[in-house]
Amino acid sequence: MAFTDLKIGLKIPYIPSLLPCGRGFQMHSGQLVFSQVMTHIPMPTFRTCVRRYRGNYKIKRFTCLDQFLCMAFAQMTFRESLSDIESCLRAQRTKLYHMGIRGNVSRNTLANANRVRDWRIYADFAQSLIQTARVLYINESFDFELENTAYALDSSTIDLCLNIFPWAHFRKTKAAIKLHTLLDLRGNIPTFIQITDGKLHDVNILDILVHEPGSFYIMDRGYLDFSRLFTMHQEAAFFVIRAKSNLKFRRLYSHPIDQSTGVKCDQTIKLTGFYTAKDFPEKLRRIKYYDSKSKRNFVFLTNNFSLPAKTIAELYRCRWQVELFFKWIKQHLRIKAFFGTSVNAVKTQVWIAVSVYVLVAIIKKRLKLDISLYTILQILSVTVFNKTPLYQLLTDSDYTMECPVNDNQLKLFD
């Protein structure tokens, strides 16, 4: 697709977020930064998700797209409440059309949309963005050689008020939800997210997780259930998990090690506990590793016998990325203070927050930026109503384009 500049007669490819803007060549004079960010979302996919759950059924004014854009604006600019969103957008009402928002923005309208619009619309759309991001980050490398896909599995608890969120019962006087996340360590992209009440134990997520053959799943001791791990083993997936101190086993063989790498022992073992031996009847690999930074010993269990012991230890070190992911989204996205109290409103807000996170990751990769996701989000938060080209804004570059001018205008007077 291309268009022609009438002044200079030059054909220019239409790439909204990549076009330079020079002193004499103003291509983005009418496009806001927020609109440039939103050009990276696949609109046909979004419309498919809306039709799948009949999101716009009998809706005339405030559509699902309007809801998504308002909530994405709230995430990008750190809004604290629905009134906050309403005040900010109404103060810029002349720019709403250029942001893509066609409906009238009001607190009650947005609250009702969050309450009744099916949250699965935004869950499915976030999954489509995740697939796009995974393709972009597929060639990301680790600090060590690993051809397999590696995932980190963990959960994070978000505390809520029991009087306001009675459906999220957690303790006698406390409410909470859990965010169970499977993080692809190539690019730190969440590939699986399950939102449950706080009472659900972490290990139950292994029952609904689809295991990819040949992939590694790195988990903490909270997921140590040998019957579920054996199911993963039968599906040809690998796991790396910390062992408990009271593990009963019998050593079958000790592999040669290099203690200078921090590996203290590399053993092939067989479980001897009454129940554990039945739950996992196959051999396991036990690795003891000393971390010189934390000055602690770690014992890992895995069903992979081909990778070096040091690589297994480094894989578990990468599990910390999922902790950083939870910390990042809690600090820089709005998932601790919710705009609605219903289950649907909470899940809608979380999935749109995930969409914004993944969208920022997509933009970073497409524009080949060296700055962090935190820096990108901070810059976008204060420039959403600017008209600076996105690449120039995020790289602090002053682009100019020299265009030869062919002046064919006849002289009126000699």
Image: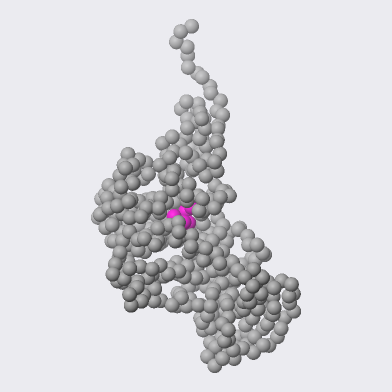
Please identify the dominant SS of the magenta region.
Answer: helix
Would you say residue 291 is visible in this rendering?
yes
Which residue sits at x=59%, y=66%? 318
Residue 119 in view here: no
In the image, farthest residue toward the bottom: 274
Residue 341, quarter of the rendered image: bottom left
Pinpoint residue 387: horizontal percent, then vertical percent. Answer: 44, 38
**Residue 345 in magenta stretch:** no
Where residue 344 sits: x, y (%)?
Answer: 32, 64
Does the magenta segment cover residue 359? yes
* Identity of the residue drawn at 33% across and 75% down: 173
Q: Quick one: 156 or 37, which is closer to the camera?
A: 156
Q: Identify the residue at image location x=54%, y=69%.
A: 152
Count all numbered tags in the image, as a single digit.
0
- Place of residue 400 in the rendered image (x, y in percent of width and height, measured from the top left): 55, 32
297 left or right of 93 in image: right
> What's drawn in magenta, residue-wise?
355-360
Q: Is residue 119 left or right of residue 399?
A: left
Viewer-side residue, 46 vs 363: 363
Q: Residue at x 40, y 67 (%)?
A: 158
Q: Could you say where residue 297 lies in the image, as x and y percent from the top left?
A: 63, 77
